[in-house]
Amino acid sequence: MISTLKGTISEKHITHLVIEVNGVGYEILTTNEALSNLLLNQEVKLQIYEHIRDNLYDLYGFLDSQTKDLFIKLIEVNGVGPKAGLNILSIGSVAEVKQAIASGDTKLIQMAPGIGKRVAERVVIDLKDKVGLVSMVDNKALLTSEEIAKQDEAVQALLALGYGISDALKAIEGVDTNLGTEERVKLALKEKI
């Protein structure tokens, strides 16, 4: 299984690159962001996802593992294949796509070619709690809700009680962070009732 490819970009096309590795040219389908950031003859290392079906063998390449991970989550959604997954990733940065999913912005997701209302809704429903909310300041992503949850014992307690990440964060929002974990959880639960 190919996990990464490191080589020189020998060709650039509208939807893919060709990376030359030890005399072999690998055709790599990739996002618009990667295509616009990478240059011909540039040495590059891409995270690779192999898609193998009957008579089909495609390689999908990503600039970082975070993009690859989101791609894998997207293609696990019923009705989203690898090409649709790439299209969704091409509507913005990884942080913007995650934000759209977490906030339920199906209109933005529908901007991806070939993605209709039903598929966009399914993406939101299936991935809302998996991608996490992204805190934005001056259009820069600071922390995902997963990172916040790892750092906050009260959020961890709510997750253990069966809350999803976004629900746990909403429940704990506004509760004084100077209180002890147990008191914060009690207040969060009281607010939900």
Image (cartoon, helix red, strand yellow):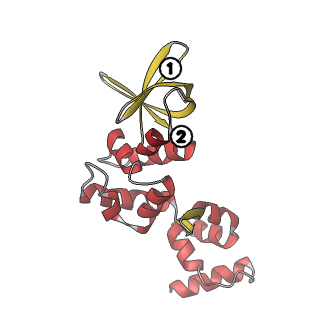
Q: Is residue 76 at least partly visible in the picture?
A: no
Q: Name the side, left or right, on which 14 lies relative to 172.
A: left
Q: Position of residue 160 (x, y in %)?
A: 60, 66
Whether 167 is drawn above or below 22: the answer is below
**Residue 137 appears anywhere in the view:** yes
Left or right: residue 28 versus residue 7 is left
Instruction: Give the quarter of the image for residue 150.
Output: bottom right
User: How many labels were placed on the picture?
Assistant: 2
Using the image, determine if residue 127 lies above or below residue 148: above
Question: Residue at the location (47% across, 63% down)?
Answer: 99
Helix, strand or loop for disc 1: strand
Residue for badge 2: 63
Position of residue 55 measured from the top left corner of the image (x, y, whole percent)? 30, 21
Label 2 to label 1, Cα distance in Å?
16 Å
Q: Residue at x 56, y 73 (%)?
A: 169
Up/down of 67 relative to 174, above or below: above
Q: Residues within 10 Å of mark 2 (few under 14, many from 20)?
A: some
Q: Nearer the viewer, residue 178 or 158?
A: 178
- Type of the residue with mark 2: Leu
Picture coordinates of residue 97 (x, y %)? 44, 57
Marks 2 and 1 in Cβ contact (< 8 Å): no
Mark identifier at residue 147: none
* Residue that appears at 32% across and 46% down: 80
Name the amino acid, label 1: Glu
* Quarter location, residue 122: bottom left
Residues 175 and 101: in front is 101
Q: Residue at x 62, y 86 (%)?
A: 187
Decide which of tag 2 and tag 1 comes sooner along the chain: 1
Q: Is residue 102 left or right of residue 79?
A: right
Give the farthest residue toward the front: 40
Which residue bears the numbered disc 1? 20
Q: Is residue 34 above or below residue 123?
A: above
